[in-house]
Image: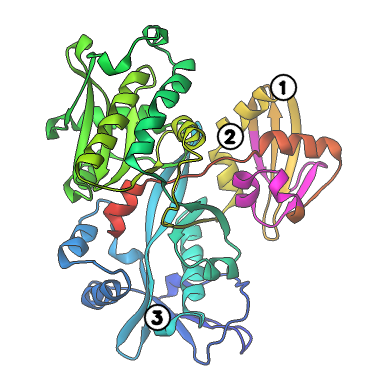
Amino acid sequence: MSVSMNPRDFVIVSKDASLASGSLTARPVRAAESIVVEKANTGDQPLVYELLQTVLSGLSDVDFQHLLDSPDYRADLRLIIRHERKIVGHVRLQPVDIHFGQDVIPTIDLVEFAILPEFQNAGYAEALLCEATAQAKRMGAALITALHDAPQPFQNQFWTEVSAVHPLVMSPRDLLAGLPTYLECIRVTSEDENTSAKADVLLDTRYGIRPWRFNEREILIKLYKKEFAQNYGARSRSPDYWDWLLERRAFHRILVVVDKDAKDKIVGFGVVRRNHLVEFAVDSAHPIAKFRLLRRFALDALESEFHAVGIGPNIPLHDRFILHDVLSTKQQPSRLVGHLFAKVVSANKLIRAIKKEIGKRCVAAGIASGQLSLEEPNESVSLEVNAGKVKVRKGANSPNRIMVQDTARLLLAGFQASESQIQVAGRPTAKLAQALFSNVPFERSAWDDLAGNE
């Protein structure tokens, strides 16, 4: 089946009937020929590997095999574009569940997105994004995300740039100098009463640091769930995915913090890759353990003669904010990992997926009841709030209406940031929308990205 557009626009021709695209709303791009998007088959793997090796520098045959061994890998979720006998464009759809406060959103993440340099800026990337979005909708996803260093194709397809992903970067000496202030900040909200005493933490021998052992996998899983379950954007990891992630070894070591007063119970871990603390999670009841882990990381970096260290971006939000404030004057320019983009596939499914979070925000804002309709160009959804409970219906059933171009921007960037793109019917509607839609730092794991795109 084929979908034709104005001759100045690109044309998508699907060789598989199941790839029939919906309506396309893209900016004109220069492409004299038809662009054919099709599903890859098993026989295309050598050509896909050749493309990824060219575009994603450093990808070895072992790395590629690891990608094929991923528990969520499906060969039928690769989309490709051919030119003559070569594959010049490729993207893989990866089904994931991501945390959004108290809820989990069914999401499609686009990975291994690659276009040969000579075919860029000619509509090939837009064609892949358009077909990937259509397929994500057929798969029942509520949201589609992608991390990429070229924003233009996503902007052409009206995706929302959620954040520019980069770690906190500073010298190890500056990190060491800022840690005492960091410790005092996290002590304020600590659940551990013993940490309020102004003891010399450098002389405290309660916590020890040692390398992680493979039989401690379950402990890492529990700590990750506890510390990241309330994050926005953190991936929900299955046991099979954890096995693959650890076997993939896109890191150099994992350090664990043990509580000697509790029979060496593990209370935290940190994933280290060279001079980068890719991910860390420490029980919030043990702030000194966080101090110890960061201090050990900084001392190891000094011993290895690293001039700079990076932290995150996937760390618990509370710690990220404090570290950013404490070290704001000491941070160094950091290499941009990429732009994180999101697009709502189904506003109805998205709002249904985050009902608990919306109810929680209503309670926090003191809103006992209210109605609101969100109207996108191709979809409308209504929500009714009553005593923290949320009901969602298709269609615009409320007089309190918001006309919005993209629910993703409203949901993640916040109501105030989206005012130029929405139309609100009345002040009560604006008040309700402001309470429900606030700016949230939508993050993703650097460890997941290293494992998938190293």
Between marks 1 and 3, how big is the CA–CA gap? 53 Å
Q: Is residue 162 left or right of residue 278?
A: right
**Residue pictured at 83% horizontal, 42% vertical:** 399
**Residue pictured at 67% horizontal, 55% vertical:** 379
Tag on residue 28?
none
Q: How far across and how far down the image is residue 39, in percent? A: 36, 73
Q: How far across and how far down the image is residue 139, in percent? A: 44, 56
Between marks 2 and 3, how big is the CA–CA gap? 43 Å
Q: Nearer the viewer, residue 103 or 409?
A: 409
- Could you tell me the amino acid type at mark 2? Lys
Mark 1 nearby-residue class (10 Å; few <14, some 14–19, many ≥20): few
Q: Secondary structure at mark 3?
A: helix
Is residue 223 visible in the rendered image? The answer is: yes
Q: Secondary structure at mark 2?
A: helix
The residues colored magenta run 391-419
Read off the residue under disc 2.
355
Badge nearest the viewer, 1 or 3: 3
Q: How far across and how far down the image is residue 223, in percent? A: 31, 28
Q: Is residue 407 left or right of residue 231?
A: right
**Residue pictured at 84% horizontal, 45% vertical:** 425
- Could you tell me the amino acid type at mark 1? Gly
Tag on residue 117?
3
Dividing the picture into quadrants, the one containing residue 290 is top left
